[in-house]
Amino acid sequence: MAGQHLNITLIQSDIVWEDKAANLKHYEEIIAGIKETRHVVVLPEMFSTGFSMAPERLAEPMDGRSVQWMADMAVKYRCILTGSLIIEEEGKYFNRMLWVQPDGRIGFYDKRHLFAYGGEDKHYTPGDTRQIASVNGWRINMLVCYDLRFPVWARNKGEEYDVIIYVANWPSQRSTAWKTLLQARAIENMSYVIGVNRIGEDPKGNIYTGDSSAFGPLGETLWQQTGNAACHTITLDREALQKARTNFPFLNDADAFILP
């Protein structure tokens, strides 16, 4: 039986550049302070390092310190913890979004669309498979930052998923695109969309204003935070989702195509 409600906690914070210990300590303090029921807690893209192009120095294996920290947090606080890390596997580097459950199971999605404008394609290997996670009967499409610009990759085939979660390091100079495309993905896929971005400034001079957001299946803004750090829990409602899809069955008329 699917749960009627799903609580997703969005954590919007600064990231200390390439300092894993400082970032993990900071995020643990935030997670410990969450008062609401925690189902899924979402951290930004590359939350332990910032959007670094130095995977040779910073990457960890799947049994490394940062993944173990996520597992420890998931167990301690009885939640699913998600966000992306720099992961090394078989000599390749991935911008990997992990889905870490309190029962010890770990799923993951490797970022498909690497940000060539920032040189990400020179250092990382792209993923080739979508991943739909599940919690309490809710189906979650896991995506990372630049994936947002490519709607075919996010397309909801029928009612394949109920929520998209994007984790990002998306600079403020392109914040209009971030907010507009998040809303568009909700409308065209008739799903909830959650976008979690960082704030602060990195050594490259990129400024981040967050604009972390939650949108409903008809594109309605449920929550958005610009500029400041935030830890906010949004409660998603299955009845509202089903009502929108029943009253406006637009997905039935979508073009047919095959995704890998």
Image (cartoon, rainbow, N blue to C red):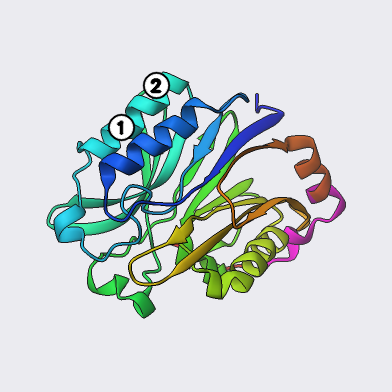
- Assign the N terminus to one quadrant of the image: top right
The label number, if any, that marks residue 121 in the structure image: none
Residue 69: assigned label: 1
> In the picture provided, is 254 more to the left or to the right than 212?
right
Q: Which residues are magenta?
A: 245-254
Which residue is identified by label 2? 75
Picture coordinates of residue 114, whole percent (x, y)? 36, 69
Q: Main secondary structure of the magenta part?
A: helix
Q: Amino acid at mark 1?
A: Trp
Give the amino acid at mark 2: Val
The CA distance from mark 2 to mark 1 is 10 Å
Q: Is residue 31 magenta?
A: no
Quadrant of the frame with the C terminus: bottom left
Q: Position of residue 224 (x, y in %)?
A: 68, 53
Residue that extends furthest to the right in the rendered view of this protein: 247
Badge 1 crowding class, 10 Å Cα cut-off, few under 14, some 14 to 19, many 20 or more, is some
Q: Which residue appears farthest toward the left when viewing the image?
A: 91
Judged left or right of residue 219, residue 180 is left
As drawn, 97 above or below 36:
below
- Residue 151 vertical placement versus 39 (above, below): below
